[in-house]
Amino acid sequence: MPQFAYRALNSNGRQVRGKLSANNESDLVQKLQATGLMLVDSKTVKDSKIAFGGGLVAREKIQFFVHLEQLQAAGVPLIDSLNDIRDSADTPKLRDLTSNIISDVSGGMPLSEAFTKHPRVFGDLYSSLIAAGEESGKLTESFAHLVHHVKWEDAIRTRIIKAVRYPVVVLIIISGMLMFMMGFVVPGIVEFLKSNGQKLPPVTEALIATSDFVVHYWWTMLLTPVLVIGAITALVRLSDRFRYAFSCTVLRLPVLGDLISKLAISRFAHFFAVMFQSGVPILQCLETAQRVVTNVCLEEAMRVVRQQVQNGEPLSSAMRNSGQFPSLVCRMVKIGEDSGNLGGVMDNVTGFYDKDVDEAIDGMIGMIEPAMTVISGVIMGWIVVGVMGPIYDSLGKLGA
């Protein structure tokens, strides 16, 4: 179905621009009229995937669901709420997305089903929560849960960036310093040392060999990490066995493995809590929560948990049997099952592990900083000893 870029007028005479999928221009006119717009002009867009290929940023999603929550709480009909969001949208992407949702909902499609047509913007959790709200008549609560979810998801993304950015920046600085010293500073001094014809100590010989390697084969230092990462990525995509083994190995890494495990448990507990509190059946909660865990080893453990729950096993026992959940989490889930407050307990698990993740990230950064300082000191010390030793020997011979 082609997509049209249109210019239209709303009921207040305000000009609205956007993109909408339609069979032809007559179909476009009918769809716009159904949403209270009068077409002024339009043109076809060659690639209809461009509009939503990049998704929405967190701020736009929060704006979208906050408006829906407030308008629904005030008793405004859903179509009118969506029209208001479309007309007040700050970005063309949000406006075009809302226009397509309005078109689908106006045609009789449930809002949850309209969301499923945009999987790159709204994942399974969004459509599941909306569907639960439609069935229970509590759409306002579903929108409130989604606002909470988007804010949490954005906070998690910020934590991950924080965990990755600092080590990468420090590593780049250390590597750049090493290549500069070995590629430009050391070769000049080496020429002076060789011109004296004196016998060089082993530490200086090693420094010269390293400098020669950097000068002549610097490209291998840049290419090797790329090739290794590319090979691992290709094997992860092509081989299920390697992907599983690699995921389990990552979990056993010191510091990083513990951080990945805590992030995964936090995501699992959050998705489960949000969906369970919205009235989604427990098996569907487990299925969706399983898909959001990016580590294959943990995903397999959660698949086992879901299968055992489906067979009648309590969730706490199934989690304990998987061997991937800490005993604290299993005990808290057991308390939630006994008290009938499983969703609230999962919220507590999320909050606990969110703080734990923050502490783990701060601890990792605190460990990396002195480690990088020591590495820098060792490199500089090696260069100083390797260069200054022969220079002092030369000066000593001249003085003699």
Image (cartoon, grey):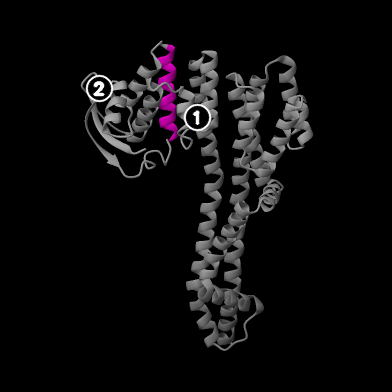
Q: Is residue 71 magenta?
A: yes
Give the main secondary structure of the magenta stretch: helix
The type of residue carrying mark 2 is Asn
The type of residue carrying mark 1 is Val
Q: Position of residue 188 (x, y in %)?
A: 48, 78
Q: Which sits earlier in the primary sequence, circle 1 or circle 2?
A: 2
Q: Quadrant of residue 42?
A: top left
First to last magenta residue range? 57-73
In percent of the image, x 54 and y 23: which residue is there? Answer: 129
Q: In which quarter of the image is residue 271?
A: top right
Question: Pointer 1: what residue?
Answer: 150
Can you see residue 218? yes
Q: Position of residue 91 (x, y in %)?
A: 33, 33
Question: Pointer 2: what residue?
Answer: 10
In the image, 172: left or right of 38?
right
Query: Closer to the camera, 367 or 212?
Result: 212
In percent of the image, x 59 and y 65: which residue is there? Answer: 379
